[in-house]
Image (spheres, grey):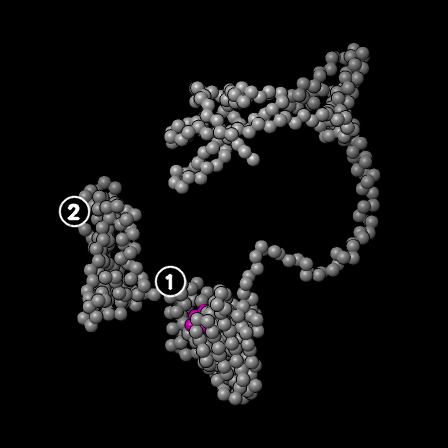
Amino acid sequence: MQYQSVTKGLDRATERPFRSVYNWFMKCFKLDADECELHISAVTTRTSSPVYWELVPIDNTTFWKRFVDVSLRRGLPLVLFVQAYEKVIVEAQTTHVYDEATIVEQVVENNVNEVNEIGDDDQAEGSQPVREPRGEVDEGEHIPGLVEQMQREDTEGDVRGDEDSDNDDDRPVQVPSQWNNYDHSQLLVNEGETVPWEYSENEVSVGAIYHSKIELKEAVQRWAAKSLKKEFRVVKSSPQVYDVKCIRDDCPFRVHAYMGKYDTFWSVSRIEHHTCILEELEVQHRNLTADFVAQHMYSKIVNNPGYEPKSIINSIDDDFQYKISYSKAYRAKQKALEMRWGTYEASYHNLPRVLHTLCQRNPGSYFEIKHYNLPEDPTKRVLQRAFFVLAACINAFQYCRPVLCIDGTFLTGRYKGTMLTAIAADVRIKKGNSMFCGKSSMSSRTSRLPN
């Protein structure tokens, strides 16, 4: 389809209404308004960089003036895309289809005619003239004809309802036979996409797909501890292959899984079952590692950080019928907390970045960090103390009383320490403004700050 580009001069563009612009285009293109019609669209862009041109239809004065105003303010030319179409004339056809509006009008006319007839009879008897309907609210309550008609319709409806309601409760209800079928196999929900990894909770099978290597290892450990009640050893564990065998050399048990070169999931390709006989149930299981216990008890530990290691031991005994040591339960709890909130070292390591970001978001704030180098490794630094104050506190301290109160609280984490807070009372509103100076003496095992 070919288009023609024409440049025209339009005077008083900001003052013209859209209908005037439309007629001006009809005259420019010498079109007959009875035979043709125009579709006008504005060629504009919403962004200056990058520039994406788009068509915005214009069909009223508000859109036209907004387009002209935006274009002039942004220094853009007034570019319009005008299309001419022939008008489609639809001949009226006589049909016998009556819509709801026609039926309602006929009912209203019949009711009005009935009211007029009743009014004529009343006037013939010498009564007062009947008030005609004018479309006012609740006017039917003051017109005797409408009141009598509504009462007559209510009476007819009550009689008809009494006739229809005879012996309804005594009739037997025929329930279709298919309603008694409780087959819910067809009640499926299509969520639009299928999950690419599928596996059973307490069993590993050939063809099972897992999202990550961690989920694969957890599934094999759960299968061995809860269902098989036998131990295994890891033969090979690499970024692409995971292979385990039974701890007994004469047992062919084996689970082999891999991640394809172009895949993002793990798949179980080979399983050999146990042939060894379990002579007696062991008290401990070597595959119930601290990582596995942390994954299994994650929700309980995170929801209740005060969950004691003894409770973890009892929970593992109830779920797997095996005992774990107190130290393993403690390490599992620490791993679960680290999975949720990170390590202590990472928290100290991120402190300079956090304070720097706070100062950027609050201009005028100030922070300072003091550290020392490790004697055995001068390239590594250890946090000693940090100071931070917001700009609002700096500006407010000059209006406070010349008395400072220092309050300290102990840090109960792995590396202990003390957080000091300076407090002053406002002279007028007597509310405190505070800043804190954190002081903590860290060992060589604290986080390494960036050089």
Asked which secondary structure carries label 2, the reply is loop
Q: Which residues are magenta?
A: 291-295
* Residue 243 appears in the rendering: yes
Among numbered discs 1 and 2, the one appearing first in the sequence: 1
Secondary structure under the numbered disc 1 in the rendered image: helix
> Which residue lies at the image location 83% right of the left edge and 39% below the top edge?
163
- The image shows residue 409 at horizontal and vertical percentages of 26, 60
Question: Could you say where residue 348 lies in the image, as x and y percent from the top left?
Answer: 28, 62
Q: Position of residue 56 (x, y in %)?
A: 50, 33
Of 262 and 201, the residue lying toward us: 262
* Residue 76 covered by magenta stretch: no
Q: Amino acid at mark 1?
A: Trp
Q: Quadrant of residue 443?
A: bottom left
Q: Position of residue 223 (x, y in %)?
A: 53, 75
Of residues 329 and 229, the one nearer the viewer is: 229
> What kind of secondary structure does the magenta stretch mostly adopt?
helix
Is 428 or 81 nearer to us in this picture?
Answer: 81
Q: Which residue is mark 2?
A: 402
Q: Pointer 1: what residue?
A: 341
Q: Image point 54% across, 19% down: which residue?
A: 27
Left or right placement of residue 288 versus residue 132 in this view: left
Residue at the location (20% across, 42% down)?
399
